[in-house]
Image (tube, rainbow, N blue to C red):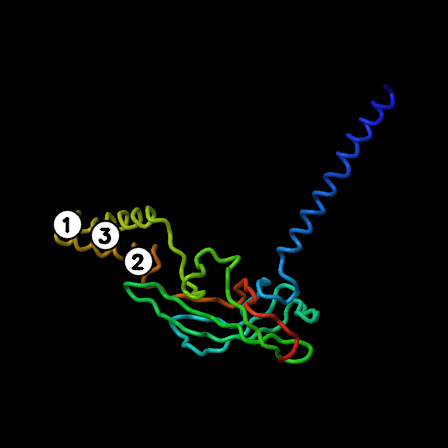
């Protein structure tokens, strides 16, 4: 009887110690399988811009420079430290107008390695510290001013309309009140929706990139 109890205690202890460790190792194995290998497509890293880019002033084809924030490892094992230069260019710019938002498209072309400039194919997927901008994945990675909630747009337009109508109301001029309200409402709506606003990527802005093709430390 005593031996059966002892065996039961051993089995229970075994289940508490071994099974969780086994499960943890399985989870780690799954995580390692899901994560892309070094320099493989899907690898993410952050860069900061050295060049200011604006939809108002710049044109397609403008070159720009960025620098890595993270350590980047190429597929052949070369480790590129933070601060590694990255070259790119503006692919396309769509300036803002009254009916649409400004958009711009960027390409990242080369990264500096100990063996020289190596080809880089990476796209923007996020701007970690910038809430006013977002990436449109269904528009080939276009960067655009983020939309605000619809009810905020309405509230802003109503508040502006009341403020715009105030002078006309005070003067008891219904035409001036209506004109002022309409103009102020339109201006407020455009301001909150991003319509008519140009887009600027300032120096030192962080961009998160994802590799689209394998990264090698030299030209292939």
Query: The N terminus lies in which quarter of the figure?
Result: top right
Q: Is residue 173 left or right of residue 148?
A: left
Residue drawn at 36 percent across, 49 percent down:
149
Q: CA distance from mark 1 to mark 2?
A: 28 Å
Q: Which mark is residue 171?
A: 1
Query: The C terminus lies in which quarter of the figure?
Result: bottom right
Looking at the image, is mark 3 or mark 1 earlier in the sequence? 3
Task: Report helix, strand or loop for mark 3.
Answer: helix
Q: Nearer the viewer, residue 102 or 7?
A: 7
Q: CA distance from mark 3 to mark 1?
A: 13 Å
The residue where tag 3 is placed is 164
Q: Nearer the viewer, mark 3 or mark 1?
A: 3
Q: Position of residue 165 (x, y in %)?
A: 20, 50
Looking at the image, is mark 3 or mark 2 earlier in the sequence? 3
The residue where tag 2 is placed is 190
Callout 3 touching callout 1 (CB < 8 Å): no
* Residue at the outermost top position: 1
Above or below for 105 versus 62:
above
- Tell me where residue 191 sits by quadrant: bottom left
Q: Is residue 25 left or right of residue 119?
A: right
Task: Report helix, strand or loop for mark 2.
Answer: helix
Q: Position of residue 190 (x, y in %)?
A: 30, 58
- Tell me where residue 43 sits by quadrant: bottom right
Callout 1 touching callout 2 (CB < 8 Å): no
Q: Nearer the viewer, mark 1 or mark 2?
A: 2
Q: Residues within 10 Å of mark 2 (few under 14, many from 20)?
A: many
């Amino acid at each position: 009887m005593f031996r059966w109890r002892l065996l039961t205690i051993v089995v229970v202890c075994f289940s508490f110690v071994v099974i969780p460790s086994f499960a943890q190792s399985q989870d780690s194995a799954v995580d390692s399988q899901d994560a892309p290998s070094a320099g493989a497509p899907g690898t993410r890293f952050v860069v900061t811009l050295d060049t200011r880019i604006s939809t108002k002033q710049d044109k397609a084809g403008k070159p720009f420079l960025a620098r890595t924030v993270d350590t980047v490892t190429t597929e052949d094992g070369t480790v590129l430290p933070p601060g590694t230069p990255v070259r790119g260019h503006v692919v396309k710019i769509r300036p803002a107008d009254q009916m649409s938002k400004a958009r711009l498209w960027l390409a990242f072309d080369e990264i500096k390695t100990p063996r020289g400039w190596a080809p880089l194919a990476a796209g923007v997927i996020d701007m970690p510290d910038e809430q006013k901008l977002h990436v449109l994945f269904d528009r080939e990675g276009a960067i655009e001013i983020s939309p605000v909630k619809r009810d905020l747009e309405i509230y802003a337009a109503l508040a502006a309309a009341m403020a715009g109508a105030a002078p006309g109301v005070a003067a008891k001029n219904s035409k001036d009140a209506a004109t002022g309200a309409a103009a102020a409402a339109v201006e407020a709506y455009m301001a909150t929706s991003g319509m008519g606003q140009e887009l600027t990527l300032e120096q030192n802005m962080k961009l998160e990139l994802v590799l689209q093709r394998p990264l090698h430390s030299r030209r292939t």
